[in-house]
């Protein structure tokens, strides 16, 4: 299984709403035994052990709108099937603090997901969508909003949703996708 966290490379993006997928990969990496490290042209990756299983976690080196290049390269490099791809990304349609796990659905306007679907010519993979929409009405354009940092009062919620996402991933590995969906899609 390959878990890809979407985000933008570079320090200036590290704390933005758009980079929550990277944050989940960082948390998984920090809390797991690292077996192997992969430094490739399009991604940084790690083979880790989670719930007694070896999985690959990846952070693309491409910008969000070109995430598909990195995902396609990773699937080819590891010889992995599309069904074993798990994409972890921010979602403006979901309230901050909530997650939704889906499979085989359209991109919903997310540029990173659009890039992945275009590059692999398939949407039959799992997406772990993490809510980034705050309680206040969005008064800026969506691009500015997703590239903005979380507000100080949102930081604790963000930490909890990162933990929740890691728990959902562990549930997928321990039980199965359906059980994780029933427990975490709220």
Image (tube, rainbow, N blue to C red):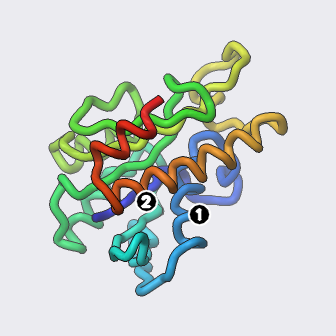
- Residue under the image location 27 percent in, 29 percent down: 106
Secondary structure at numbered mark 1: helix
Where does the image place residue 51, in percent across and percent down from the top left? 41, 70
Neighbor class of circle 2 (other Cα within 10 Å; few <14, some 14-19, many 20+) is some
Residue 45 vs residue 98, the one in the foreground:
98
Query: 22 left or right of 14?
Result: left
- In the picture of the structure, the residue carrying the numbered disc 2 is 170
Which of the 4 image quarters holds residue 134?
top right
Where does the image place residue 38, in percent across and percent down from the top left? 41, 80
Query: 131 left or right of 44?
Result: right
Q: Which of marks 1 and 2 is in front?
A: 2
Query: Does 7 appear above or below 46?
Result: above
- Residue under the image location 60 percent in, 53 percent down: 163
Q: Say the numbered circle drawn on residue 118.
A: none
Query: Does 45 appear above or below 62?
Result: below
Name of the residue lying farthest toward the bottom: 35
Name of the residue lying farthest toward the right: 152
Secondary structure at numbered mark 2: helix
Where does the image place residue 132, in percent across and percent down from the top left? 60, 33
Q: Say the numbered circle drawn on residue 27.
A: 1
Q: Distance between the residues labelled 1 and 2?
A: 12 Å
Where does the image place residue 83, in percent across and percent down from the top left? 18, 53
Query: Does 45 appear above or below 182?
Result: below
- Residue under the image location 61 percent in, 26 percent down: 133
CB under 8 Å between discs 1 and 2: no
Neighbor class of circle 1 (other Cα within 10 Å; few <14, some 14-19, many 20+) is some
Query: 179 left or right of 64?
Result: left
Which mark is first along the chain, 2 or 1?
1
- Residue under the image location 32 percent in, 36 percent down: 102
Residue 167 vs residue 78, the one in the foreground:
167
């Amino acid at each position: 299984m390959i878990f890809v966290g979407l985000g933008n490379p570079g320090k200036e993006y590290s704390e933005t709403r758009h980079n929550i997928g990277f944050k989940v990969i960082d948390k998984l990496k920090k809390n797991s035994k690292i077996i192997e490290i992969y430094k490739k042209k399009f991604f940084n990756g790690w083979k880790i052990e989670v719930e007694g299983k070896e999985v690959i976690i990846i952070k693309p080196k491409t910008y969000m709108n070109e995430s598909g290049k990195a995902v396609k390269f990773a699937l080819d490099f590891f010889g992995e099937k599309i069904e074993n791809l798990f994409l972890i990304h921010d979602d403006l349609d979901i309230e901050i603090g909530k997650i939704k796990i889906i499979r085989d659905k359209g991109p919903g306007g997310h540029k990173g997901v659009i890039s992945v679907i275009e590059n692999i010519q398939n949407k039959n993979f799992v997406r772990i969508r993490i809510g980034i929409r705050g309680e206040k009405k969005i008064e800026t354009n969506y691009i500015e909003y997703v590239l903005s940092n979380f507000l100080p009062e949102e930081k604790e919620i963000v930490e909890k949703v990162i933990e929740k996402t890691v728990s959902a991933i562990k549930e997928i590995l321990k039980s199965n996708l359906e059980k994780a969906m029933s427990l975490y899609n709220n």
